[in-house]
Image: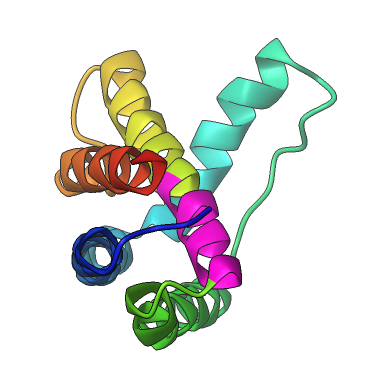
Amino acid sequence: METRPHETSRAGTIYLLLGFAQAAHSIEEMRTHLYDFFWTATGVLHSTIPALPQFRMAADTFAVINMSLIALLLGTVPFVQAGRPWALFLAGVVGVIEVLNGVGHLSAAVFFGGYVPGAASAPLLLVLGFFLLRELRR
């Protein structure tokens, strides 16, 4: 994938904003105890699709996983901005994951009929993920 410098810079800026949005999203998830909601959400999925397990996650485990992902995302921003092929591929993977993350939280809010942990910041992930993917396709 060959890109022009201004396109790479634009993708890098969106990727950076997505990293900050994911950090805010993770804070929301921690403050609203998403890790406790896993049991309920995965229980509903398990009752529909028995092959999917129902699980819990400790708060500290959830925090470590989230902070590691945010560090990876923000740590790779300079490489995305520089247009490194592996970093642009990673940015595309992140874009898809964040779109799915946003859709998942919003779908859960609709399914459960109200707010679920992470739903307030989910639209930002969805929109920025979409814009990042669109920019990477140029």
In this image, 121 relative to 43: left or right?
left
Q: Tell me how many marks there are.
A: 0
Q: Residue 136 in the image: x percent, y percent?
A: 38, 48
User: Considering only vertical position in the picture, is 126 above or below 65?
Assistant: above
The vertical placement of 10 against 66, above or below, is above
**According to the image, what is the colour scheme of the structure?**
rainbow
Q: Nearer the viewer, residue 123 or 130?
A: 130
Q: x, y percentage for residue 69?
A: 49, 74
* Dominant secondary structure of the residues highlighted in magenta in the image: helix
Residue 81 visible to the viewer? yes
Tell me where residue 43 sits by quadrant: top right
User: Which corner quadrant of the image does residue 24 belong to?
Assistant: bottom left
Residue 86 magenta: yes
Task: Residue at 51% x, 36% y: name it.
Answer: 40
Q: Is residue 71 above or below residue 18?
A: below
Point out the stretch of residues depicted in magenta.
85-95
Residue 14: percent from left, percent from top: 21, 60
